[in-house]
Image: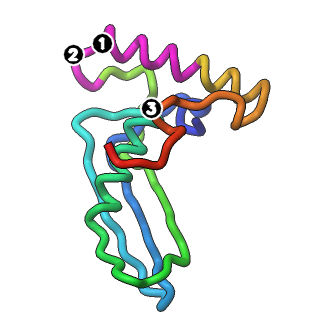
């Protein structure tokens, strides 16, 4: 949501994890095209998280960073423009509702359950 507030989108997603022994690990994923869609960033983070082998280690810190930022209105590909415009409008509507009624007022249906797909 902060990316959309600042009218930015990013192409590189970084996940940082620090374990109970204060050892820090980072994984990075470069997306095919820049985004500020929460669901795309979430899927990228889930993919990166699967690469971590923490075993029975407890986690002290989790950090998420989006980089290689560009202005939201810049189109970095000529494909899927109509689909992206619909998704962008959906995310804008969600942002408006959350600002007005709070972050728990509306959620994606897929985020209601903690199960693997």
Q: Which residue is mark 1?
A: 81
Give the secondary structure at mark 2: loop
> How far across and down, in percent of the image, does residue 76 sit?
28, 26
Where 55 sits versus 83, above or below?
A: below
Among numbered discs 3 and 2, the one appearing first in the sequence: 3
Residue at coordinates 27% horizontally, 53% vertically from top-left? Answer: 29
> Quadrant of the image for the N terminus?
top right
> How far across and down, in percent of the image, does residue 107 sit?
59, 31
* Proximity of marks 3 and 1: CB atoms separated by less than 8 Å: no
Question: Image quadrant of residue 39?
Answer: top left
Find out whether residue 67 is within the magenta segment.
no
Q: CA distance from mark 3 to mark 2?
A: 18 Å
Residue neighbourhood size for the residue with mark 3, other residues' Cα within 10 Å, grouped as few (<14), some (14–19), many (≥20): some
* Proximity of marks 3 and 2: CB atoms separated by less than 8 Å: no
Answer with left or right where residue 51 lies relative to residue 71: left
> How far across and down, in percent of the image, does residue 48 sit?
31, 58
Q: Which residues are magenta?
A: 76-92
Front position among marks 3 and 2? 3
Give the secondary structure at mark 1: helix
> How far across and down, in percent of the image, does residue 80 sit?
25, 15
* Proximity of marks 1 and 2: CB atoms separated by less than 8 Å: yes
Q: Which residue is mark 3?
A: 37
Q: CA distance from mark 3 to mark 1?
A: 14 Å
Colouring rule applied to residues: rainbow
Residue at coordinates 22% horizontally, 36% vertically from top-left? Answer: 32
Residue neighbourhood size for the residue with mark 1, other residues' Cα within 10 Å, grouped as few (<14), some (14–19), many (≥20): few
């Amino acid at each position: 949501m902060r990316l959309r507030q600042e009218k930015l989108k990013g192409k590189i997603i970084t996940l940082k994890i620090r374990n109970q022994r204060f050892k820090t690990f980072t994984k990075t994923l470069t997306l095919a095209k820049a985004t500020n869609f929460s669901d795309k960033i979430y899927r990228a983070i889930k993919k990166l998280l699967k690469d971590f082998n923490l075993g029975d280690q407890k986690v002290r810190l989790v950090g998420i960073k989006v980089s290689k930022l560009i202005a939201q209105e810049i189109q970095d590909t000529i494909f899927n423009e109509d689909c992206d415009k619909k998704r962008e409008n959906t995310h804008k509507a969600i942002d408006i509702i959350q600002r007005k009624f709070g972050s728990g007022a509306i959620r994606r249906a897929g985020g209601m359950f903690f199960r693997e797909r």
